[in-house]
Image (cartoon, rainbow, N blue to C red):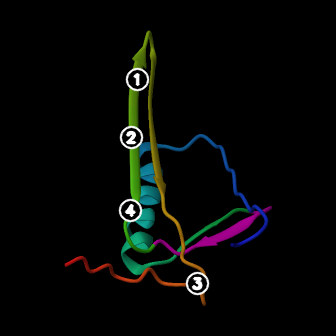
């Protein structure tokens, strides 16, 4: 099992075009199997593979609109035991 925890967090105000470009870059990274998140302070590289878990929530409250998109997956470690197929007769 991989030990340790790495994280990246960035918050800023962006216009619609910038947000669209960021979302397109994420989609392209998922398609290529590699997404790099970075700013002046931090950098993290992720390699999405296999089945990805998607969670999407959207809320509207008074003048505040928000949606949250979460994509997660587990990475099989190199050298990890692969599950053997089961046969029942």
Q: Earlier in the sequence, mark 3 or mark 2?
A: 2
The quarter in which the N terminus is drawn is: bottom right
Q: Nearer the viewer, mark 3 or mark 2?
A: 3
Dividing the image into 4 quarters, which one contains the C terminus? bottom left
Instruction: Check residue 77 in the rendering and tell me which mark sits there, or answer none.
Output: none
- Discs 1, 3 touching: Cβ within 8 Å: no
Q: CA distance from mark 1 to mark 3?
A: 40 Å
Between discs 1 and 3, the one toward the N terminus: 1
Q: Specify few, some or many for label 3: CA neighbours under 10 Å numbering under 14, 14-19, or 20 or more.
A: few
Spatial separation of the CA atoms under disc 3 and disc 2: 31 Å
In the rendered image, which residue does mark 1 sit on? 59
Please provide the residue range marked out in magenta. 40-48
Question: Mark 3 sits on what residue?
Answer: 80
**Quick check: is 41 in the magenta stretch?**
yes
Is 18 left or right of 58, judged from the image as shown?
Answer: right
The residue carrying mark 2 is 56
Closest to the camera, between mark 2 and mark 4, is: 2
Q: CA distance from mark 1 to mark 4?
A: 23 Å
Residue that badge 4 annotates: 24
Q: Nearer the viewer, residue 71 or 44?
A: 71
Please state which of residues 47 and 15 is positioned toward the viewer in this rendering. 47
- Look at the numbered disc 2 and give the secondary structure of its residue: strand
Q: Residue at x 67, y 68 (%)?
A: 44
Task: Classify residue 39 by image quadrant.
Answer: bottom right
Q: Is residue 66 magenta?
A: no
Percent position (x, y) of residue 67?
43, 34
């Amino acid at each position: 099992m991989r030990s340790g925890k790495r994280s990246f967090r960035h918050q800023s105000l962006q216009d619609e075009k910038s947000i669209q470009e960021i979302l397109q870059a994420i989609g392209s990274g998922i398609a290529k199997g590699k997404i790099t998140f970075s700013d002046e302070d931090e950098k993290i590289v992720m390699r999405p593979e296999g089945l990805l878990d998607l969670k999407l929530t959207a809320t509207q409250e008074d003048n505040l609109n928000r949606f949250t998109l979460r994509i997660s997956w587990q990475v099989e470690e190199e050298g990890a035991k692969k599950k053997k197929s089961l046969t029942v007769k």
